[in-house]
Image (spheres, coloured by chain):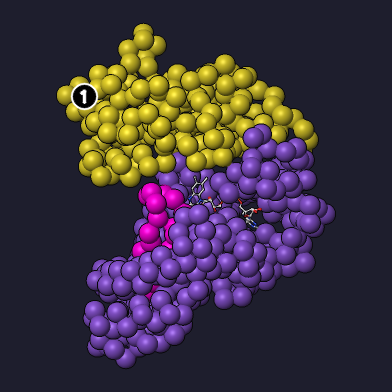
Chain colours: A purple, B yellow
Amino acid sequence: MKIPAFSYHRPESLDEALGLLRDHGDDAKVLAGGQSLLPIMALRLGRPEHLIDIGRLPGLASITVDGRGKVIIGALVRHAAAEGSTDIAGHAPLVSEALPHVGHTAIRTRGTVCGSIAHADPAAELPAVALATDAIMVAESSDGVRHIRASDFFEGYLQTALRPDELLTEVRFPPWPDNTGAAVSEVSRRHGDFAMMGVACTISVADEITAAALSFFGADSIPIRATEAEQSLVGRQPDGDAFDDAAKIVMSTLQPGADLHASAAHRRHLAGVVTRRALAEATSRIGAMA
Amino acid sequence: MTLAGDTLTISVTVNGETTELTVETRRMLSDVIRDDLGLTGTHLGCEHGVCGACTILLDGRPARSCLMLAAQADGSEITTIEGLASTDGTMHPVQQAMHDSHGFQCAFCASGFMLTTVALLAAEPKPSRERIRRELSGNLCRCTGYQSIIDGVETAVALIDTEGSDR
Ligand SMILES: Cc1cc2nc3c(=O)[nH]c(=O)nc-3n(C[C@H](O)[C@H](O)[C@H](O)COP(=O)(O)OP(=O)(O)OC[C@H]3O[C@@H](n4cnc5c(N)ncnc54)[C@H](O)[C@@H]3O)c2cc1C
């Protein structure tokens, strides 16, 4: 279908954009890459009265690494630009691992990293990556700036801690720890489809496993960490036994739902599969990244 | 200053020609390409980004023209299927290869597949069959079962290689 009518605004500065959000917040939507918002409107699942196109705002399209190794990705960084960034590959490798799984090349031409996080689709890769790496979301409004931790950011199905008058101006990924590998493993019907089950995983090893993150997408109404399974890995050797045990815990603690694409039992099975695959892959990449 | 209103005058370069158009801000780029510019080779299937029939090249990269407001395309360079052949009518190697290997049947999906292929081969002149499959996974065909299309891409790779030109 053609999208429902709306008032279009194309601000030229961040202040103008924040002013528009203050005035129209509840009835407005930010338009970034449009790769989620426009399909929603075409399917008439959403009818915002105002669209605030942030596509021309200056200064938001940059990827920077600060002196400590923190990676800052601005609101207008497209998936495609992030995918090709050696800074991200070197300092936030879990993001690089996730991007090829996000839709198709044509979607990544337009879609933005921040848009994906703000949209908070529970089956999307990047929200789970943000949760796995303890990323910080920077939210700006005409009232000021808030820094929101990933663990506080995702509140429900397509619901985040962002207020209607706030713009997500950047996402910050903390410095990548030493001896840490990253992997994203997922199962979907076709390459580029949303995952039936997937996990964004990091593992740190020094003699033994010192830390692990298992952040699932397609498993619940928000991205979700399997903390019990993560803790079970600490102090063990990074081998098949440890990974099997973690997978068993994942399968008994996650409570995935059922839909057209997969039953709950099938999803639980897949959760075990992707856990084992991701842990092995992430372990094999330790040292290969920095 | 914030631009706002029901219409917007945009400037786009389509297949090498720069035009100014006044468009309703609500309209999609795909509709403007088809209805205002008369370039009906860009097809509309699902109109929500899934089928890939409306794929164009936006500043050289594949993009869904049904998932972009025409207003968002202001200032960009667009290639549609009509822009692939040379002005003398010689087909682009990707078009020639698809023709030679009977890549398509009804061909409703053809423009999207060929533009996606052109972008793939520009980035990666000799992709593996697996890579081709991956890259074309965002384009749907309901006739062929895809084998002939992937054969066509491989034919294009060979054709470009022997011609020594990728235009
Ligand atoms: C065919 C298809 C397949 C896809 N497959 C996948 C997939 O496998 N995995 C995946 O993760 N995604 C997938 N996507 C979605 C894609 O990744 C989107 O690009 C992304 O979810 C949204 O980014 P965007 O910039 O396009 O945001 P938009 O569509 O512009 O916006 C999405 C939502 O976020 C809000 N928003 C956007 N930016 C901001 C901001 N800076 N501040 C505040 N709010 C903001 C908007 O108001 C809107 O509510 C797919 C999309 C399509 C069409």
Looking at the image, residue A22 lies above or below residue A251: above
Residue A249 image point, x, y percent: 39, 82
Within 10 Å of disc 1 (Cα), the crowding (few <14, some 14-19, many 20+) is some
Chain under disc 1: B
Looking at the image, residue B118 lies above or below residue A165: above
Quadrant in which residue A5 is drawn: top right
Residue B151 image point, x, y percent: 24, 31
State the residue at coordinates (41%, 49%): A192
Residue B91 image point, x, y percent: 33, 16
State the residue at coordinates (30%, 79%): A243
Q: Secondary structure beneath disc 1? A: helix
List the residue tagged with mark 1: B159
Left or right for A47, reference A82: right
Quadrant placement of the C terminus of chain A: bottom left
Q: Nearer the viewer, residue B119 or A186?
A: A186
Q: Is residue B58 magenta?
A: no
| The residue at label 1 has a CB less than 8 Å from ligand 1 | no
Inspect the image, locate mark 1, and give the three-letter code of the amino acid beneath it. Leu
Which residue appears farthest toward the bottom when viewing the image? A235
Left or right for A255, reference A157: left
Can residue A113 be spotted in the picture?
no
Can residue A163 be spotted in the picture?
yes
Quadrant in which residue A212 is drawn: bottom left
Q: Nearer the viewer, residue B15 or A231?
A: A231
Looking at the image, residue A241 lies above or below residue B31: below
Left or right for A219, reference B87: right
Magenta residues span: A184-202
Q: Nearer the viewer, residue A209 or A21?
A: A209
Q: Is residue A187 magenta?
A: yes
